[in-house]
Image (cartoon, rainbow, N blue to C red):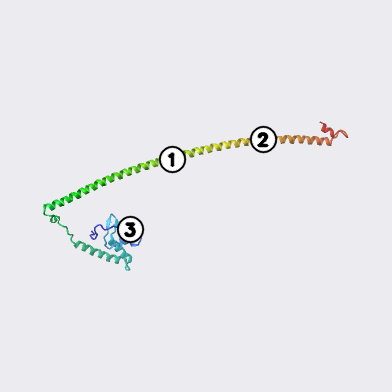
């Protein structure tokens, strides 16, 4: 297991490493596979690699190398092993808190008073945080109510608008149907007038035709030398 990670050291995702190193995200995965194939250790969250600063430096070394990638990866693995050895050889000094406690009762009392004050301050802060959380919940609840009210108002306005549109549409439809009916009536009246005119023309044509026939007969068959033709007009 890796022991070269510093406390509170920042972790990077593959996308962040790609932006940091200046390579594509698939290339980050490719370099990671090459390093692991040669024995490099990454921090893992399941199957997902978690990168730290030393890993980014290894990826940069792979990016900039002129040698085959596997050869450079082996060198980086060896460097990592040396770092791990140095980290394992370093003893962590754990202070003996009991040796550092003051022996004077008055000093112990002062330390306890200080701890009591810090505890009281922490409790007060917790109370303040609790109050802040309550206020935040109230604000969120009000925002939800406002959102509901606004949504209802928008819904009502939409319904009223739709009702007005439907009413106007119905009025326009009725008006159009009324105009259409009036035009039909006018058209029927015009048809009737045209029919009357045709009938009148037909009657006039027949009268004229009869007149022409009688006139022609009068001309062709005169009854006398003087009165035959003019007697036609006396009828």
Residue appearing at x 34%, y 42% in the figure: 142
**Image quarter of residue 33:** bottom left
Q: Is residue 119 above or below residue 55?
A: above
The C terminus - image quarter:
top right
Residue wearing tag 2: 193
Q: In the displayed structure, does residue 193 sit left or right of residue 2?
A: right
Q: Which of labels 1 and 2 is toward the front?
A: 1
Residue 189 shows up from this direction: yes
Crowding at label 1, few (<14), some or many (≥20) Cα neighbours within 10 Å? few
Residue wearing tag 3: 16
Q: Nearer the viewer, residue 73 or 91?
A: 91
Q: Nearer the viewer, residue 218 or 230?
A: 230
Query: Residue 114 appears at what percent x and percent y?
Result: 17, 51
Label 3's element?
Answer: helix
Q: Nearer the viewer, residue 124 or 142?
A: 124
Residue appearing at x 59%, y 36% in the figure: 182
Crowding at label 2, few (<14), some or many (≥20) Cα neighbours within 10 Å? few
Label 2's element?
Answer: helix
Residue appearing at x 23%, y 47% in the figure: 124
Residue wearing tag 1: 157
Query: Residue 214 appears at what percent x and percent y?
Result: 80, 34
Q: Which of labels 1 and 3 is toward the front?
A: 1
């Amino acid at each position: 297991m890796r022991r070269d990670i510093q406390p509170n050291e920042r972790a990077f995702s593959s996308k962040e490493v790609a932006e940091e190193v200046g390579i594509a995200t698939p290339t980050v995965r490719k370099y990671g596979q090459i390093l692991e194939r040669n024995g490099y250790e990454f921090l893992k969250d399941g199957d997902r690699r978690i990168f730290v600063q030393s890993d980014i430096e290894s990826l940069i070394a792979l990016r900039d190398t002129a040698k085959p990638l596997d050869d450079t990866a082996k060198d980086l693995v060896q460097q990592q092993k040396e770092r791990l050895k140095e980290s394992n050889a370093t003893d962590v000094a754990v202070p003996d808190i009991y040796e550092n406690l003051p022996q004077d009762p008055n000093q112990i009392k002062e330390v306890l008073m200080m701890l009591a004050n810090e505890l009281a301050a922490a409790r007060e802060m917790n109370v303040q945080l609790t109050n802040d959380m309550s206020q935040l919940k109230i604000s969120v609840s009000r925002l939800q109510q406002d959102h509901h009210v606004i949504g209802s108002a928008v819904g009502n306005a939409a319904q009223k608008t739709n009702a007005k549109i439907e009413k106007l549409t119905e009025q326009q439809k009725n008006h159009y149907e009324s105009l259409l009916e009036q035009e039909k009536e006018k058209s029927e009246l015009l048809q009737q007038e045209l029919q009357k005119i045709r009938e009148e023309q037909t009657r006039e044509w027949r009268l004229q035709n009869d007149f022409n026939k009688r006139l022609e007969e009068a001309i062709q068959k005169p009854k006398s030398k003087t009165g035959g033709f003019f007697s036609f007009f006396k009828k």
